Amino acid sequence: MAASSPEWSSLLPDILGQVIARLPHIADRARFRAVCRLWRSALRLQDSHRRGLPWVVLDDGAYLTPSDGRIHHLPLPMNTRCIGSTSDWIALDRVDGVTQKHTYTLHNYFSHAAVPLPELDSIIGNVPETFEIRKVLMRSTPDDLVAVTSNICRYPFILCRPGKGAWVARALAMPYFRIIDFVFLEDMLYAITKAESLYAIQLDEDNDGKPDVSFVKRITRHTPYPNNDRYNNDMWMGTTDYDASRQENAPDELVDDDSDIDDDNDYSSAYDCTLSDCEEVVSSKGYDLLATYRHLVELCGKLLMVRRQCLVSAFTPNHHTRKVEVFEADMDKGVWTSVTGGLGGGHAIFISDGLSNIIAARGEVKEDVIYFSDTNDMFDMQTGIIRSLGPISRLDACWRTCVFPPDLIV
């Protein structure tokens, strides 16, 4: 009599746990949970205690899974690159090899769902070679608001909703052309400038669902100039009461929509100048630079600013974080207050090119730690120690962002 086949459901929990630990990819874990009810329960238990680091994505679609240190490749169409990410979605920019026209798409890294963004195509489809998108952020789902900042004066800030239309800030209008980072919070968008001024932008829409902005309000003031001498500072850092008054009392001067965009996209205007870089160069050390970056994140309704000083190496890919400070916006007093010792509530921050995100800490994600994927290091808020995340030479000197595998729904 032939021996009966083993019951897969009879495997011991510790063996199942070892198998799960060797399945970093969401597709493999989905197949695992489909075997039987016991395996599904084992995966649910394992995921309740384990969370891996987010995947590091390069502009060519290649990605690294920190759990196993492997480089993988996402097949992208020719002349397509990644320009940003939100949670488990990436933003793609494809350039036509003949016409040089740009088309934009949101792509889910795990389900492979795709959402075209023709509203962006019509606005920033034909752009100068110097054009760069600095950040793409979805408010919630891909069919909701998508916000975009760029380095060109003509289109510094764009709001679009797929299938509904787009809203474009007027060229050189305050505060849009000085925005260096932003986050969504309910029906508001909060943005910071290099001068550390925080602005609240009230989001709205017309009867057809087309995005709009109803008003802008300054929440915090920028840091005072040393010795009251504003001429010793970067020209982009100054923001005056006149700017704030003008943009609050005359919103029509600040807002626009895509109806004013010329069909032929004539780029001979002075508005095609590029905006200053988001980082602030503090000093130079030989050919190397010390630069300060500022990032805005939202934690349980609170707004945090991460101020980071980095050494930018000229000839070697040894960029690294030198100093980190965290501040919370006091919305009533209009000031930034220092945050030390931790975030509270078991959270961690992830920052990379065009991305700043907070997630719950568990597993490989440590509490009160700020992870910098762009420099491959981390800052422990409890100890104040900065240390490397480990050697990943394939990513040295490359643009990179992160995607976050979704929690399994079981």
Image (spheres, rainbow, N blue to C red):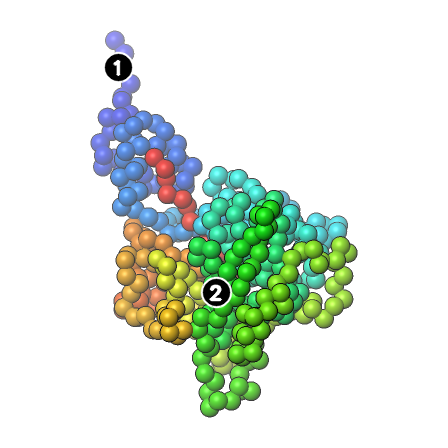
Q: Nearer the viewer, residue 280 or 165?
A: 165
Could one spot residue 151 in this view of the protein?
Answer: no
Q: Is residue 344 visible?
A: yes
72 or 347: nearer the viewer:
347
Residue at numbered disc 2: 200
> Residue 59: image x %, image y %?
55, 54
Which residue: 29% across, 25% down? 8
Q: Which residue is mark 1?
A: 3
Q: Secondary structure at mark 2?
A: strand
Q: Quadrant of the N terminus?
A: top left
Residue at figure coordinates x 69%, y 68% from the top left: 271
Residue at the limit of the structure toward the bottom, as seen here: 227
Q: Is residue 338 above or below residue 127?
A: below
Residue 340 place in picture, x, y as percent: 30, 70
Q: Amino acid at mark 2?
A: Ala
- Count residues near mark 1 (Cα–Cα under 10 Å), then give few for <14, some for 14-19, many for 20+: few
Under mark 1, the amino acid is Ala
Question: Mark 2 Cα within 10 Å, few/some/many (few <14, many 20+)?
Answer: some
